[in-house]
Amino acid sequence: MPPKKARNTENTSSESELLDSSEGPSIKTEKIQRKRATPRQSHAAIVLAIDVGSTSSLQSAHGETESDLQRSLQIADWIISRKLFTDSKDQFSLVFFGHECTTDDNYSNVYVHNAEFERARVEWLHVFKNEIQTNPKCPGDYLAALFASLEQLKIHGENGKDGMTEATVTLISNFGGLSEEDQVFEVLDSVVEAVNTIGAKLLIIGPDLNKETPISKSQQFGIEFIRNLLPKIDVTSYNFQESLSKLQFFIPKSITPRGQPFNLELGKDFSVRVQLYVKNQEVVLQERFDPVSASTSTADREQPQMLKKIRRYETVADHERCITLDAIDSTPDISFTSTSTVNKALSSMPSGKFVQKEDIVRGYRYGSTIVTFDKTIQMLSDVPREGKQLQLIQFAKKENILPQFLVSSPRYILPHRDGKVSVANRESDQKSFNTLSALVNAMLKKGVVALCRYAYNIASNPRLACLIPKITKKENYPVLIHYLMPFRDDFRYFDFPSILSAEISDYQKDLIDEYINNLMLCDNDGNNELLKKRNIHDPRIQHQVTILFLIYENI
């Protein structure tokens, strides 16, 4: 069944132009005189459909001061902001339904802000904040918006199917735009068929379905339609409050764990294929700052101009020093009219010659003598590297490895898993599992650990590593916990003062007990953890994102 058209209202001109997406120049090589095809980047295609109709001015949540439209725009703002900060490759199309403008006559009052999918842009934050308002002339037809969004995804999939990995429609509405007269349930099967045909996912953000709050009859009708839609297709639903709580913290781009392949050399001609994983790693927020001109006025939203830095080298004697820019700025312009005046005004300017970059070598100063250190000497002084390796040196008793000898965070060595379905790869993975499992069980039985010679890659110097055996409780999986250990030159010994009295007073015992009780992150029974580490966000990253977000808003 074709989609039902929304109510017809007066169609006015568009308030904002479509945002342009620019493509980079084609790449040329010197050896092959032909254009290289631009690779398609894998991305998720997301349609962000927001209700701006007359019913969006309602307040679905009891006791809230913000309207549903304000909360919808806040949610959309946070979605786009998080994609900006993570430099996500996902592409978006913004759709506003209940709008006074119409992009396609088949879907009245559905305005497509950008028909071409593009990555998240800062300009959209200004659109949410300054340009979008409630349209009192007509309600928001979420069915028309849903069909228009699916059509957008279908067109995008046909044009760039190789690069699209996922299609999602995010529908943000209070679902008060339709009533029983619109015969919504008659097109329920058409919605299911259209979603399944494209293979799209549906994310619905709206009022709380379980909370008994006073809502209008049209909203009750819309919520009943959503309830009937949930079991038939791949739908994820959140209410406004849940969405805001999930989006209020910045979450960095998720990284799929990928093991670093190694050959654990147990003997001269005997090695085991393993993979090394890092469980916890500090996330560094990628802040891309480029030098730009600061003279551009931001009031008119002019794009600042990019700057190019040119570096040059000039010979200078020991008694001379380079002139600073402040000294040049403080010199009157009339001083530059003649050479003699310039020499008087800038007596410290060196009279050297320029040197090309390829003619520069490093030099070390020993007193008044400069010793050059060219590439030939550097090659002789470099320590020869044997490349990537994980070689067994010997086994040692576990009690001989003291805690202060472990100088790095743990890494985990697991049996090699290729992930390919060929018979040869499966047999190789099974051999790796059996060998490592036998090794770990034997080490646990004898109570020993393995000392290894370890180098991460070809550019790394060899380090001393310790492999501690472990069998996981849930899966009975063999694991070697990898720690770096210090060399003799890395040890630092401390001289501690002697303790006057080794006895602890009752006051000190009570004080320590009270201190521990106050810092326990569990309830009174000791069962439930009050503050889980997996839910604690890095305050440094959150602060940086907040500052950047405020700067974006003021651009």
Image: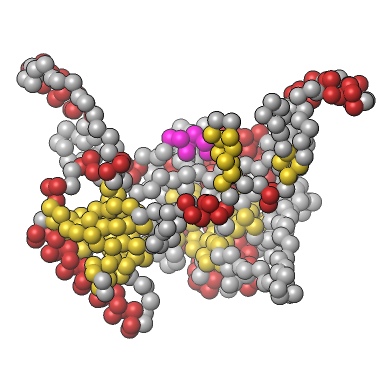
Q: Main secondary structure of the magenta part?
A: helix
Which x, y percent locates residue 493? 24, 32
Nearer to me, 98 or 340: 340
Which x, y percent locates residue 455? 36, 57
Which x, y percent locates residue 209? 41, 49
Residue 172 in view here: no
At horizontal 84% and vertical 24% (from top left) the residue drawn is 343
Residue 259 in view here: yes
Question: Would residue 550 be found to the left or right of residue 402 on screen?
Answer: right
Direction bottom: furthest residue: 423
Question: What coloring was used for the rendering?
Answer: secondary structure
Question: Would residue 52 be found to the left or right of residue 297 on screen?
Answer: left
Residue 451 falls inside the magenta stretch:
no
Q: Quadrant of the N terminus?
A: bottom right
At horizontal 20% and vertical 72% (from top left) the residue drawn is 434
Residue 41 lies in quadrant: bottom right
Which x, y percent locates residue 393? 23, 60
Q: Is 46 rendered above or below residue 125? A: below
At horizontal 36% and vertical 79% (from top left) the residue drawn is 421
Q: Quadrant of the C terminus?
A: top right
Question: Would residue 89 be found to the left or right of residue 424 on screen?
Answer: right
Q: Is 293 rendered above or below residue 13? A: above
Nearer to me, 305 or 241: 305
Number of residue marks = 0
Nearer to me, 522 or 25: 25
Nearer to me, 512 or 302: 512
At horizontal 45% and vertical 66% (from top left) the residue drawn is 233
Query: Which residue range is magenta in the image?
Result: 539-545
Direction front: furthest residue: 369
